[in-house]
Amino acid sequence: MASILGLEVHEAASTGDYDSLEEFLNTGKYDLNLGDEDWGNKTALHWACQRGYVECIRLLLEHGAKPVRTLTGWTPAHFAAETGKLSALRALHSAGVRLDKKDNYGCTPKRLAEIYNHTECLKFLIQVEHEREELRCRAGSAYTSDNEEDDDDVFSLPASILVEETTEASSTPPASSRRRGQGSSRAQ
């Protein structure tokens, strides 16, 4: 069960009480990723995103809050998308938080924005999805993974590293393309 101290942080985040939240965080006594069992393990970051308190979101992230999942697999982005809090989605994205994670039932924040007709959130999430796909393409297959958890670390690499690796890899044609050319001449 969440401690009284943890619940104070949750309450400050859920009401947008930036001053109290900052005071609590500066003491260093709080586990920012503590989930409230009575609310499906929602953290202070989930509450701030659900309510759209951007300054509280930034403060929590600066102090080390992680975009952990609730019992149903929802991330802070799910709560922001469900309630149409575009500014919260932008704050998460600016901090490098993935916005496309699926919950335990396969639902993404983008799908929630669509279901609840939050058009601006949906447009933003589509834009972010396209940017991420573009980055994947530029990074090359050496930096892609089917494991979502591995992907988190991939896209935190500096762009220069991704470009250098991709350039080196593309200077030599893959063995499979050399074999294709040889194979077609044998068939004739």
Image (cartoon, rainbow, N blue to C red):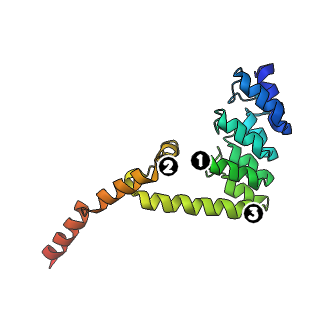
**x and y, in percent, of residue 114 in the image:** 73, 61
The answer to whether mark 1 and mark 2 are in CB contact below 8 A is yes
The type of residue carrying mark 3 is Glu
Instruction: Determine whether 41 is above or below 101 in the image.
Output: above
Q: Quadrant of residue 137?
A: bottom left
Identify the residue at image location x=22%, y=60%: 175
- Tell me residue 138's x, y (percent): 43, 61
| Left or right side of 48 for 66 | left
Q: Position of residue 4 (x, y in %)?
A: 81, 20
Work out how far the residue at label 2 is from the one at label 3, CA to CA, in angstroms. 25 Å
Could you tell which of marks 1 and 2 lies nearer the N-terminus?
A: 1
Q: Residue 187: image x %, image y %?
A: 16, 75
**Residue lying at 59% horizontally and 60% vertically, measured from the top left:** 129
Q: Nearer the viewer, residue 134 or 144?
A: 134
Indicate whether 39 appears above or below 111. Answer: above
| Element carrying mark 1 | loop
SS of the residue under disc 3: helix
Q: Which residue is mark 2?
A: 155
In which image quadrant can residue 125 be found? bottom right
Which residue, given by chain and number where applicable, does mark 3 sit on? 120
Q: Amino acid at mark 2?
A: Phe
Residue lying farthest to the bottom in this orientation: 188
- Give the crowd class for mark 3: few <14, some 14-19, many >=20 residues within 10 Å: some
* Residue 16 in view here: yes
The CA distance from mark 1 to mark 2 is 9 Å
What residue is rendered at 20% in x and 66% in y?
178
Residue of label 1: 96
Pointer 1 local density, CA inside 10 Å: few below 14, some 14–19, many at least 20: few
Please tell me whether mark 2 sits on a helix, a strand or a loop.
Answer: loop
